[in-house]
Image: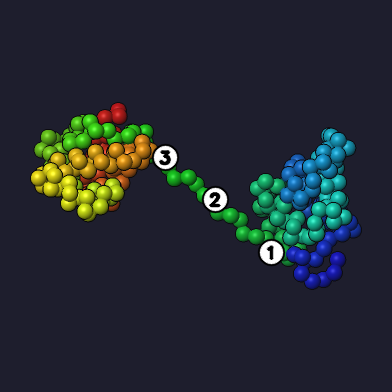
Amino acid sequence: MAVGDLHTSELTEDDLFDVYREVLDVAAVWRDIGLALRVRKPELDVIRESHPQSPKDCLKDVLSGWLQGRNGTPTWGALCEAVAEPAGGNNRALAEEIACKHKVTLKPSKPQTSEPPKPPAYLEQVVTLRDIGCIKYKPPGTTDIQILRIERTINAHWDGLAQQLGIDHDECASIAMAKLQDPGRCLSEVISRWLNRNGRKNTTWNHFLTSLRDSGLETQAEALEKALQYRAV
């Protein structure tokens, strides 16, 4: 093979033994390797029928056809990518070993993304009009005075919470006038409007607690969440 950029320099059928020897460890997934090398499914089916009990012979035939250039330009770089590909050989370590030996650059692996943890079931429950106005379930060790203070603090900050729930300043002014500046009544009206305007997926306790925290009421949100958790037990 000519000296040059080994990542793009073309391999030929004369390289079959060297190529086969490098990827022998992934012979068991020869079909996935073939797909990653863009070998067509009908051709893979024919290979399987020719060697039904021999993955190694299947792999050899896949590589032979690939080296003939029937499925794109065969290079060490392309082979390494096929070996590393999760839907192909799924063997990053072997691909890196081959790449190092033949001085090719392997594309960096994609970082694995994990889904954010799902909130507890009690936080996925929808807030209802019956929940407005007070914390109905008192966790052990919490006094009535503490609950009252939490409620009063939330009531006093009803306008900040309202804006987090999507109710603008002008509407808050209208609510304040209609409810005679009574914080508790204003908060009840805010939550009532929030519930009426949003679907069930957007009016869960998780959404409400997030809005509390975003309005600066972290302590009150934690206390309310403990009450909800106690209710769910």
Percent x, y of residue 217: 22, 49
How much space separates mark 1 and mark 3, taking CA atoms?
39 Å
Q: Earlier in the sequence, mark 1 or mark 3?
A: 1
Residue at image coords 79%, 48%: 39
Which mark identifies residue 112?
Answer: 2
Q: Residue at x 21, y 35 (%)?
A: 132
Q: Residue furthest bottom?
A: 4
| Three-letter amino acid code of the residue under disc 3 | Lys
**Image depth: mark 2 or mark 3 in front:** 3
Q: Name the N-terminal-most of marks 2 and 1.
A: 1
Q: Which residue is mark 3?
A: 118
In this rendering, position of residue 212 left or right of residue 38? left
Residue 120 x, y percent position in the rendering:
37, 36
Q: Please say if the residues under marks 1 and 3 sit with CB atoms less than 8 Å apart.
A: no
Pointer 1: what residue?
A: 105
The span from disc 2 to disc 3 (Cα, nearest Å) is 18 Å
In front of the other: 33 or 17: 33
Tell me the residue at 70%/47% (across/down): 88
Mark 2 lies on a secondary structure that is loop
Disc 2 residue type (three-letter): Gln
Residue 194 lies, with reference to residue 140, above or below; the image says below
Identify the secondary structure beneath mark 1. loop
